[in-house]
Structures are given as structure tokens and as C-alpha cells.
Image (cartoon, grey):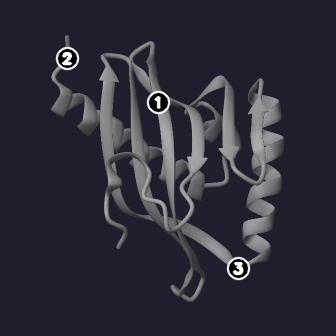
Amino acid sequence: MADAGQLAAEMESFYRRYIEAFNGEDLSALARLFCFPCAMVGGKRGMNVMNDEPAFVRMMERAKSELKAQGWTRTGIDMTHAWPMADDSGLLVSDFTRYRADGGALMSGRACYTLRRSGGQWKIMVMMGVAEPFLGPGDLPRP
């Protein structure tokens, strides 16, 4: 059995790599950080399931196009906290800020991720937004 602190650190390190990939242009590299099928869950949207890499890439092309149309250039991490649930699974909460080219904030948010370790690599199974004023898992204060 792995140490919970080490697993949490691995999960948080994985999330930093995910944001780096999200900020990049290689959507196939980004897709490799997900298990398939994977899902995005939101109260207004319900569940959006991507069964494979091509479906994920199509969805991400649309999402990033919409972000860029709003002036987005990158996303930064404000806070992460991970809770291992087993040697191969866990939850991670992150506060993030999306930035414009001039460095100004476009928007801030919080998301919760269900992660799975497969073949020694952490991957995202489910992403879910945490709407204000809700705090999500851990009741962590917002910045």
C-alpha cells in the first residue's frame, strides 16, 4: 500500500502536467491524460461523456475555440488539494484562473476531478465544476 501523502503529491504533480498540456496546442497529448470513457459533469449540462480520444479532441477543440474567442491565453493554478481513495484512485480539487494575453484575469473557478492510476500513470476519469458559493469536497475556503 502506498503512502497517502505520496499519492496526494503524485496527484497534484499530475494536475500541474495536465494544466501545462491544457495550455498547449497538442490535444492528442492532452487526451493521453484521460481515461476513456471520461465525463464532464455540470448541473446545467448534465453529463457529457467522451468515449474515445477522437470524441475528446473534438470537444476540446470547441471548448478551446470558445475560450480563445473570449480572449483566453492560458490557465493558472491557484490551489490544489488531493485525497487518495486507494492506491489507484482519488479526488482532486483545484482553484484556477483563466488569463487574457495582457495578464488580466478572464475568470476564476473551482473544479473537482476523479483520478485513476492506470499503468503507473494518473489520468482523469471525471471533471466536475464546483459552482459558487459551494466549496466542494473538503469545504476548502475559496481565495
In front: 28, or 85?
A: 85
Between discs 2 and 3, the one toward the N terminus:
2
Tell me whether circle 1 and circle 2 mark residues in contact (CB < 8 Å).
no
Q: Quadrant of residue 66?
A: bottom right
Q: Name the residue carrying label 3.
A: 71
Tell me whether circle 1 and circle 3 mark residues in contact (CB < 8 Å).
no
Q: Name the residue carrying label 1.
A: 115
The vertical placement of 110 against 125, above or below, is: below
Q: Horizontal and vertical percent for residue 37?
A: 70, 23
Spatial CA span between label 1 and label 2: 16 Å
Q: Horizontal and vertical percent for residue 89?
A: 40, 22
Relative horizontal placement of residue 124, taking residue 53 as reference (left or right):
left
Q: How many numbered marks have been drawn onto this rendered protein structure?
A: 3
Q: Secondary structure at mark 2?
A: loop
The residue positioned 46% from the left and 23% from the top of the image is: 116
Q: Quadrant of residue 30?
A: top right
Q: Secondary structure at mark 1?
A: strand
Mark 1 closeness class: few <14, some 14–19, many ≥20 residues within 10 Å: many
Q: Horizontal and vertical percent for residue 141?
A: 32, 65
The vertical placement of 140 against 30, above or below, is: below
Relative horizontal placement of residue 103, taking residue 41 as reference (left or right):
left
Check disc 2 and give the amino acid type: Ala
Q: Name the residue carrying label 2.
A: 2
Spatial CA span between label 2 and label 3: 42 Å
Relative horizontal placement of residue 123, taking residue 31 as reference (left or right):
left
